[in-house]
Image (tube, rainbow, N blue to C red):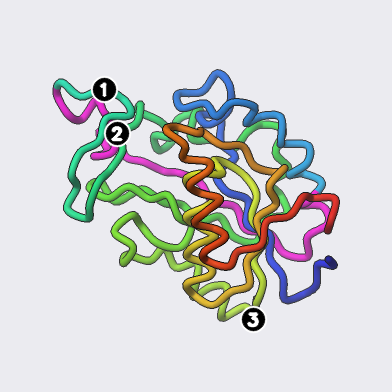
Amino acid sequence: MTLGESDVLVVVDMQNDFCPGGRLPVRGGDEIVPLVNALIERAPHVVLTQDWHPPGHASFASAHPGAAPYDQFDAVYGPQTLWPDHCVQGTDGAAFHPALVATKAELIVRKGFHHRIDSYSAFFENDRATPTGLGGYLRERGFRRVFLAGLAFDYCVAWSAEDARRLGFETVVIEDACRAIDVDRSRAEAVERLDRAGAVRLPAASL
């Protein structure tokens, strides 16, 4: 598969808090940085996403007395997992991994800054209705195919891929350039959802 001018690489949440040593580490999250950098070098167009929560965000367990990380609560938009405080605006944890080559990015999409709504997808907040603006940007730029890599496969990458398909983009998830949290079969369930949505899953070597 060859990348062309109508293709865009979306690198999802390659941030310190999602890497080992961070507040919400994904196992092996830092291991994919060299592969992601190689994809960035080859891609004609690159977009980065950045989790960008205000302090006390509603998705933080610390905002709910008596709750613990990975508990569930009923948000106005449905079930919401509670997380450790992470990717707080302006903190080192919210910064991109220092080894990530971010200079080629043509756009950085910040998400999760609405205090009451969490945001996994690069395209919509978790209410599945509030847009980030990425879909309109990609359409206006004339992109037709979206390649996805980053963290975490079973949450932000998978939700982004599903929404890319919902918006009509051809969608490819580069599986070995992702890592998963894998809580309660979340990785296997993400694979099932991606297959149902019609997203293609490929290794980086096939590009």
Question: Which mark is drawn over residue 15?
Answer: none
Q: Residue at x 60, y 52 (%)?
A: 48
Residue 158 x, y percent position in the rendering: 52, 52
The residue that label 3 is drawn on is 142
Distance from Cα at disc 2 to Cα at disc 1: 7 Å
The residue that label 1 is drawn on is 68
The C terminus lies in which quarter of the figure?
bottom right
Q: Is residue 21 magenta?
A: no
Task: From the image, state whether disc 2 or disc 3 is nearer to you.
Answer: 2
Task: Specify start and end residues of the magenta stretch as a single range.
Answer: 39-65
Residue 20 x, y percent position in the rendering: 58, 22
Q: Residue at x 71, y 36 (%)?
A: 32
> Three-letter amino acid code at disc 3?
Gly
User: Residue 172 vs residue 83: left or right?
Assistant: right
Question: Which mark is drawn over residue 82?
Answer: 2
> Three-letter amino acid code at disc 1?
Ala
Q: Earlier in the sequence, mark 2 or mark 1?
A: 1
Residue 149 x, y percent position in the rendering: 65, 49
Residue 188 x, y percent position in the rendering: 53, 43
> Three-letter amino acid code at disc 2?
Leu
User: Residue 104 vs residue 197: left or right?
Assistant: right
